[in-house]
């Protein structure tokens, strides 16, 4: 019980790997919508996407979620995936949403915060980054 109340991490590498993979799978789930033309057409009806660049923005956003999800799930170029996640979901939070990340736009902003986590933590355990580029531990 003493270790539970200490300031030392418990299974930190394993928990970070589980969080990274879960985040990646959630991004893949949301980004997979890029392959559903009917659903993508529905996004184009939103006020934010009216105009000449609407189609490009919708497909770029969903495609970015999908690519970031794959990178994070595999732990391949994890920091690049984290940057894509942060940029895409920050845009959703502050430009598509109302920027009220403390209430209305919490969910996309939480993805931004997880992106920050993996930008600094890297791929870690169970990642292709660890296999391809090694670990400095």
Image: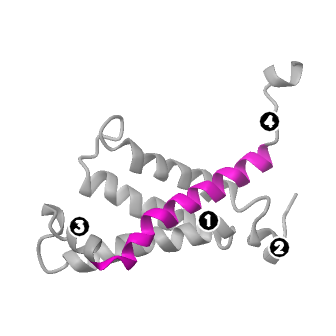
Give the answer, above or below, for where 109 lies relative to 35. Answer: above
Q: Which residue is mark 1?
A: 72
Q: In terms of secondary structure, where does tag 4 sit?
A: loop
Q: Mark 1 and mark 3 in contact (Cβ < 8 Å)?
A: no
Sequence order check, earlier mark of 4 and 3: 4
User: Which dot marks residue 131?
Assistant: 2
Cα separation between marks 2 and 3: 39 Å
Sequence order check, earlier mark of 3 and 1: 3
Sequence order check, earlier mark of 2 and 1: 1
Q: Position of residue 2 (x, y in %)?
A: 88, 19
Q: Which residue is mark 3?
A: 43
Identify the residue at horizontal 47%, vertical 59% (top origin): 86
Sequence order check, earlier mark of 4 and 2: 4
Sequence order check, earlier mark of 2 and 3: 3
Q: In this rendered view, identify the residue nearer to me: 77 or 31.
A: 31
Quarter occupied by the C terminus:
bottom right
Task: Find the magenta span and give its range.
Answer: 12-37
- The label nearer to you, 4 versus 1, is 1
Left or right: residue 47 compared with residue 135 = left
- The label nearer to you, 2 versus 3, is 3
Q: In terms of secondary structure, where does tag 2 sit?
A: helix
SS assignment for the magenta stretch, majority: helix
Q: In this rendered view, identify the residue nearer to me: 119 or 30.
A: 30
Packing grade of label 1 (10 A; few <14, some 14-19, many >=20) is: many
Cα separation between marks 4 and 3: 42 Å
Q: Which residue is mark 4?
A: 9
Q: Mark 2 and mark 4 in contact (Cβ < 8 Å)?
A: no
Q: Which image quadrant for residue 96?
A: bottom left
Sequence order check, earlier mark of 4 and 1: 4
Cα separation between marks 2 and 1: 14 Å
């Amino acid at each position: 019980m003493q270790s539970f109340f200490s300031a030392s991490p418990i299974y930190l590498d394993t928990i970070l790997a589980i969080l990274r993979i879960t985040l990646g799978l959630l991004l893949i789930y949301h980004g997979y919508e890029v392959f559903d033309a009917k659903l993508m057409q529905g996004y184009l009806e939103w006020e934010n996407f009216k105009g000449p660049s609407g189609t490009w923005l919708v497909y770029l956003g969903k495609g970015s979620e999908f690519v970031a999800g794959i990178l994070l799930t595999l732990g391949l170029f994890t920091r690049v995936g984290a940057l894509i996640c942060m940029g895409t979901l920050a845009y959703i939070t502050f430009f598509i949403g109302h920027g009220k990340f403390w209430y209305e736009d919490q969910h996309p902003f939480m993805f931004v915060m997880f992106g920050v986590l993996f930008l600094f933590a890297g791929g870690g355990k169970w990642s292709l980054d660890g296999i391809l580029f090694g670990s400095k531990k």
